[in-house]
Amino acid sequence: MTALDVTGLTVDFPQPGGRPFRAVDRVSFSLRAGRTLALVGESGSGKSTVVRALSRLVTPTEGEIRLDGARRTRGADYRRAVQMVFQDPFASLNPAHTIGHHLHRPLLAGGKARRGADVQRKAEELLRSVNLTPPADVARKRPHELSGGQRQRVAIARALAPGPQVLLADEPVSMLDVSIRLEILGLLDRLKDERGLALLYVTHDLATARHFSSEVMVMYRGEIVERGPSDEVILAPRHPYTQLLASAATGSGVSREEARAARAARLAARARRDAERREIVVGDGCRFRPRCPLAMDACARRPPEAEVGPGHRALCWLPAGAGTAGSTNSCA
Amino acid sequence: MNDSATHHSATENSTANDMVLRAEHIDVAYEGYGGARPTRAVRDVGFELRRGELLGIAGESGCGKSTLAYAVARCLQPPARLTAGSVIFHARDGGETDLLALEGEALRAFRWNKLSIVFQSAMNALNPVTRVGRQFDDIFRAHRPGMSGPERRERARALLDMVGIDPARIRAYPHELSGGMRQRVVIAMALALEPEVVIMDEPTTALDVVVQREILDEVERLREELGFSVVFITHDLSLLLEISDRLAVMYAGGIVEYGPCERIAAGAGHPYTQGLLRSFPELTGERRALRGIPGSPPDLRGELTGCPFADRCERAFEPCRTVAPRPVPLPGGGYAACHLHDPDHIAAAAGPLHEGSQS
Amino acid sequence: MTATLPTATPAAPERAAGLGLLRLALRSRRLALGLGVLAVFALTAVIGPWLAGDPDAVSVDLGQAPSGAHWLGTTQTGQDVFAQLVVSARGTLVIGAAAAVIATVVSVVIGIGGGFLGGVADETLSLISNVFLVIPGLPLVIVVAAYVKGDGVLSTVLVIALTSWAASARVLRAQTLSLRGRDYVLAARVYGEKRWRIVLVEILPNELAIIVSQFIHAVIFAVLTQAGLAFLGLADPAYLTWGTMLYFAQNAEALTGGAWWWFVPPGLCIALLGAALSLVSFGLDEVLDPRLRTRRPRKGAR
């Protein structure tokens, strides 16, 4: 059962005195109930803009968002059905209000509870479901009295209050201490199973993306460059950018000697001015081209989405096969 | 090694010759407001930095790792203050300096010349209205008054080149550089006077993985070329396992485990270190049930009784809540401040010392 | 997996909060001093007029220096200066507070409204506040006051309020612009909170500190402006304030005649009130922002 279908989502931001900046470029995907889709990318890749477009905080320039097949993103029903968890739990709770307030408001606004004892009871239920106990005490506290992990639990409870079908988690653990990250991700995972949520997990961390999601999409400068089952994409990446990300990630369980050898290889391979090349603006072609070690003439045109395995696709000329043909042509 | 285990200090037997910095019994307190109890952020911590090595200090927010580094570099700002301890710097030429006795001009000169520090958000601290070259110039003017203008410019260009930035960028303003390039500039500035010790406080945390990796590679290369020592502070233990020679893990203001990187990677002695290692899922390894460390660190105001980690430790036993653990030397080097390894308490503990496999 | 919070929560949070506020106030000497002086003035304004007697009552002692019968002497027409001073406290504070309340309300509505709504509404409201900001304040006050002269206290209050809201509105607009993009405001939008509720419940409480500080400065401005207007004879002379006292003293040539007891006390009161309000403002900043707290370096600190 599909919960949310996104087709050709494009978001442009106006720029003073110039062409609008395209933060998200023709992105399509589906979120399904009870499944987690990970959206991986670096800062500036547009992954947060995707989340904001889905939660109606920014208006898409183009594209279609369908909730259970219906195109109704303006009404209160959509608001109730699609909720999000923000990255920074220190910014996403209002310092002026108690934890209880943060849960009462969405419960009341979404018509999920009546004023008085009912809303209190439901708020306490929510707190219990995110393992904040004793709930009555927690509800009386203010955000500054809680730790980062506890705040993020409150933020998750708030997102659950309207009874959503879709939960968008925008880097939900990157601001938290290492030791509690897995607890929070585990909590999201459990809630997804219990409530049949369709979960979009936005992150820059390949390792947790692999462990907590069934499918992964990799985003680079507004485009989805690779997507597929999470083990396929992360263990056997086909797009050069995904390969670069995977090689840069820590915790690959290598020894120090191996790490040192890998470093030497990287240093040798890396073009000297790589840091500057990433800022080059490319026209129509592959956006990764200026940094790509395998770039060729064909890359000046927009690459097709090539099927590289079952359900595994990469936005690249290489696996598309046309790359070799293209280069041969140009050589000839 | 035995006598070193009598106090909370990460010192090991080593000749004075290959040692650059030795800190002992460091205590730092943050004064409380309006009669509140002071927060004892660093509690009786010591470590030793060898020439040319990279010492990693790992720990979560609030564990005191940055405070410790600032204390050693004499950069603490009120309300934080150093309440006890000693820091001795051993220069390459054999001279010894007591850092805590330095004042005013002598301290200022020492800080750039012998020891420099790269702050967490240093890349955002570059002066936005002056060109990069001018900021190098200021350092040389202040510390190398004998250098001529062309000499200063030449040196600045060489430094930029060294960290992988086009020397022509000397005319750039900070905002014209990306975050990663600004961080490279900051590192070049820290190395400008060829210090013997560089303290790096989360130097790559704000950067993307790919850029972070590039900068770390650069730091490693420079360290091999120039031979300076690094104290590298981060919350990312998995990163430290790849780059550091030795590692100190801090918790609740103290070092709970210390030792060669290989030993800790192969088998961490302290349950907190084990928990931290567990908290980083492996990119390529088997999928397994993932869990972090439940609970949160203790309140650092006032005294702690027993082991500060006892409340969160799944292997805590009788003495943990009452007796403060002492550092116990471990096979493979270093120590862990944990009763599970202490022969005086070991009989009471059930189960094996090390968790099955840490790989 | 369960993150349990310490259960030692005080039973009565409301009362604890009240006590905490008091303790907070005592933590800053400036705040305590300012509030103390302010309390004395307020008390004088409330109950003083009943105790001090009729300020307009004329006695046979004309232009007397301070004595046992007349603590602060008498005016040229034989009125008791102390009684006038006490009664004027009420008039001054009423005008100051009323003008400040109106100015603050206007600045909150225009500043926060513009900042939150954005777009054309913001442009329009910004334009209005900028116009009021660039018009020189005192001349405008004088012109308007001269135009409506004799219409009583209300016109004075309105004139002062009209000329003092614009700067606060700009400050509040800037703050609202920043708060509008905060995650907790976005979160409220995501769960479908109504706009007026977002403004009143999510944004406004976080600007209270600024509003209070702007209000205090508005009171100072209003008291000083009123004194100035009255001194120039542009306020209703029948309504007794420290400003009108100065006006009468000036007309009676008290300054050149050496009748210092007539003009020094009201002048001193104005200065003292301004100082007390400034102390409260600084003190609040100090209490609310820990970085501003004065620190005494301790011996032996390295």
Image: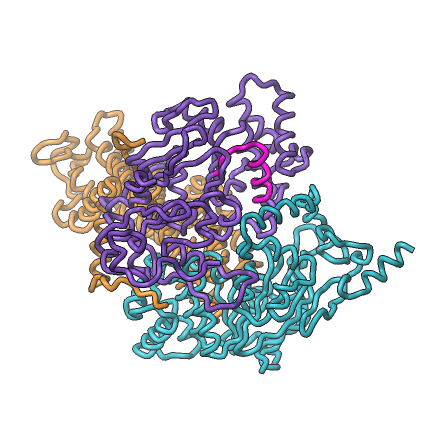
Task: Give the color of chain B as drawn.
Answer: purple
Q: Nearer the viewer, residue C255 or C61?
A: C255
Q: Quadrant of residue A30?
A: bottom right
**Residue drawn at point x = 61 percent, y = 30 percent:** B133
| Residue C245: image location, x then y, percent | 25, 38
Q: Main secondary structure of the magenta part?
A: helix
| Residue B149: image location, x then y, percent | 62, 20
Residue occupying the far right of the picture: A332
On the question of residue B352 being in view, the answer is: yes
Quick check: A250 above or below A215?
A: above
Q: Nearer the viewer, residue A317 or A147?
A: A317
Q: Quadrant of residue C55?
A: top left
Q: From which residue to which does the magenta span run?
A: B216-230
- As drawn, the chain in cyan is A
From the viewer's perspective, tell me whether residue B87 is left or right of residue A188.
left
Q: Quadrant of residue A179?
A: bottom left
Where is the N terminus of chain A found, in terms of image quarters? bottom right
* Magenta stretch contains residue A70: no
**Residue drawn at point x = 57 percent, y = 32 percent:** B226
| Residue A84: image location, x then y, percent | 50, 68
Q: How is the image coloured?
A: by chain
Residue occupying the far left of the picture: C68
- Counting labels gives 0
Q: Nearer the viewer, residue C210 or A113?
A: A113
| Residue B166: image location, x then y, percent | 68, 36
Task: Give the color of chain C as drawn.
Answer: orange
On the question of residue A93 being in view, the answer is: no
Quick check: B189 above or below C187?
A: above
